[in-house]
Amino acid sequence: MYLNSRNTPPVLLHYRTLSRRMALGAEDSRNMKIYENGFFGECLYDNLFDEVGHDNLYIFRDVYLETGKTGAQYDSIIIADDMITVNEIKNYSGEYYYKNGRFIKNNEVIPDNPFSQADRAVGKLYRICRDAKISADINSKVIFPNDDFKLYSEDDSIWKNIVIRMNLKKYFRQFKDSCNTEKAERLVSVIRSHISENPYFTGSSNIGRINKGLYCGKCGDFNLIKTRYHRQCLGCGTKESNETHMLRVMSDYKYLFYGKGMTRKSVLELIDNEFDKKVVYRAFLKYCDAHKKGNKTDYTFKYYDFDEAYKQTEKLRKHRDYLT
Ligand SMILES: [Zn+2]
């Protein structure tokens, strides 16, 4: 069973939000594509694991574990019986060659080495277990879930450390007879106590460059007609309530200016004063946590992102949306 959900990574939500409000430069576009591709591979892995079934296992997905001053990112940690398995997921596609400890594609060396990433992640976990005075066997596999991936190598030592798409279900089935032991539960609580926020993404954006205002959730058009409780898109006709727009604005704000609290002023600037300040304030009270700092208060969105907020607030919203 999954112990946590796999959310769209903040850095990918940052790029997605940015791309709705500006034309991305070449480097940002390339980065966004890399993150989209990586996340897609992780979802592919989850779907295949779901098909095989995993009720008898404990699985953490996409967690950052802190040990001392450093930490490591884990795509998937499986706890079965008394054993921990780390899966590093790489959504590579095309033909790769592995030589002298490096992956090579079209004669170009891939800067990341998934084996050393996995090895480092395993090392950190051993340290966590040692510090908690609990012993466990920890192993790792690099998973390639894309069925368009081909790997050639004369180094036979690598095959035992990888699982390609063709063998992935078979690999998951190996866990079928495992069970949740008492020790597995202790391992889960030790791991859980080290989960922290991934420090590598701190956000970056220059509000001067982005399009301010509100845009259609369906087609992204910024040309909206104002009615009392809704905005209707001139491009596709979709009509979304002011509250839905505010949810999107707050989610956008979160990922454009990651880690920064919202104020009425900063949100009004982002939406180019399209709503009255009372509308913004009401949305803060309803959907945000307030943080008082001296005589100033800033607000943080209560939900992970727009999609989560939209699902969870259906009953709270007064006016419905009309999607085309
Ligand atoms: Zn539209």
Image: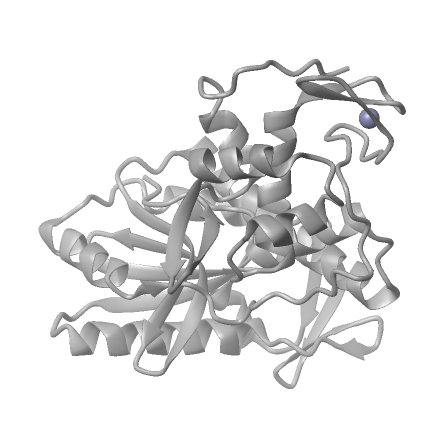
Relative to 235, residue 209 above or below: below
In the image, taking residue 161 as reference, residue 138 lies left or right, namely left
Residue 149 location in percent, x, y?
70, 55
Quarter of image, ligand 1:
top right
Q: Quadrant of the rendered structure where residue 274 is?
A: top right
Near-viewer residue (56 or 196): 196
Q: Residue furthest front?
A: 295
Residue 118 location in percent, x, y?
46, 71
Near-viewer residue (321 or 14): 321
Q: Quadrant of the rendered structure where residue 38 is?
A: bottom right
In the image, taking residue 159 as reference, residue 315 lies left or right, namely left
Name the residue rendered at 70%, 13% in the picture: 322
Relative to 37, residue 226 above or below: above
Relative to 144, residue 322 above or below: above
On-image quarter of the N terminus:
top left
Name the residue rendered at 80%, 55% in the picture: 210
Q: Residue furthest bottom?
A: 100
